[in-house]
Image: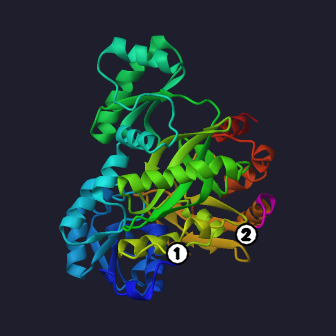
Amino acid sequence: MLETPEQSAAGRFDTVLIANRGEIAVRIQHACRELGLKTVAICSEADREAPYGSTADRFLCIGPSSAAKSYLNQDAILLAARLAGAGAIHPGYGFLSENAAFADAAEKAGLTFIGPTSSSIATMGDKISAKRAMMAAGVPCVPGPDTALPDDPDTIERIALEIGYPVIIKAAGGGGGRGMRVVTKADVLQEAIALTREEARKAFGSPSLYMEKFLEHPRHIEIQVICDDHGNAVWLGHRDCSMQRRHQKVVEEAPAAGIVPDIIQPVGMACVQACLQIGYRGVGTFEFLYEDGAFYFIEMNTRLQVEHPVTEMTSGVDIVQAQIRVAQGHVLDLNQGDVTCEGHSFECRINAEDPDSFLPSAGVVTHLALPTGPGIRVDTHIHAGYKVSPYYDSLIAKLIVHAPTRAEAMARMREALAGTEVEGISTNIPFLRALFEDGAFAQGETDIHYLEQWLKLRRAA
């Protein structure tokens, strides 16, 4: 997709260090192997028995089980890359994937960072500068100023009144659902500001906040982009990630149901224009709130998304391979007119957690049965006998299906979930099975608050 004869020698590396773990390490390793690249896998002491270690060309332990001393240890990862002779680092998602300082350190060490430049990560990682850049590119944004909130209480109250209650207070450097607080009336605004500032300072190292209009019944819609270093960019359709619990995505689908091309097309092209304007390279995702036929930009993820498979299934584009090829310097041999999204895809995140309390569940997988068949894909790193660690995120697998229509894809997911068995630990599979039997979800009549409300009713029953 991304290569012409004269470009085939343009690659600046032949060995990739995968600075991550779990299913995404497996996914990146497969993509590298298909591209003829060697891989270096790294691990903490807790992941010494990870199955992808035996299929990598090199497997290096870089530190103790604690992520802070291993997968977040920039010096250890850069040293491992040098010792193994890697020419590039793929950060996957999470950990250091959106760390501008790490991308900069990799670049200064002579390594290719398989992602955007450090400057792009810094620009889009700060929610205020990101909003400013998007407004300049004509991307629709949530009502609210593109500046940080001042310290003066009277000025803050005036901004809130101009926006109109309810408003949401957000940390400028936030993410993952942290550093946010909804305010519905003026008499609690100052307390909310103080609490969120302190939360932001502790979690993200900066007390900087901004304020936006709080949309009460939006959907969470994403647009996937790929850009090269030669002024080319495309968007690969859209996803709906509204099924969230505590701001964490549970189920994703592509395309977003009920959004007609005439509405989404201008937004997708605005995202492409924004990428060209800031000189963006690699893959990225624009996240929007969608309400009453209007889109509002909230942030950009400057990395590979957990939910990228649903876009791969509908677009036919291998996003991970495209990401690597672009990092090698190849021209993106894909025009917007070549992008056609067909059928419908769902992804369920299989987590090692109690299906009712959602508390993490560590232990040994004693039995594993995974579904197979047309339109079914499973991305995982676990096997029978695998020890699920308590040290990291509870995601153990992603179950993805694809079918001609949304209804058929839902039926296929029900069948796939019924054929998925994990024993020895608790998982959220029973919860996911129940969700795919829900009538409102089946009809696409949900927003980002629906799942929380559904869980409350379920507990009360």
Viewer-closest of 96 and 429:
96
**x, y percent for residue 162:** 48, 17
Q: Is residue 208 left or right of residue 138?
A: left
Q: Nearer the viewer, mark 2 or mark 1?
A: 2
152 up-or-down from 405: above or below: above
Judging by the rendered image, the residue that carries numbered circle 1 is 385
The amino acid on which the numbered mark 2 sits, given as a three-letter code, is: Gly
Q: Is residue 414 magenta?
A: no
Viewer-closest of 3 and 242:
3
Label whose residue precedes the other's in the sequence (2 or 1): 1
Report the magenta residues as a range.
Answer: 404-408
How many marks overall? 2
| Prevailing secondary structure of the magenta residues | helix
Crowd rating for badge 2 (residues with CA inside 10 Å; few <14, some 14–19, many 20+): few
Judging by the rendered image, the residue that carries numbered circle 2 is 419
Viewer-closest of 425 and 81:
81
Crowd rating for badge 1 (residues with CA inside 10 Å; few <14, some 14–19, many 20+): few
The amino acid on which the numbered mark 1 sits, given as a three-letter code, is: Gly
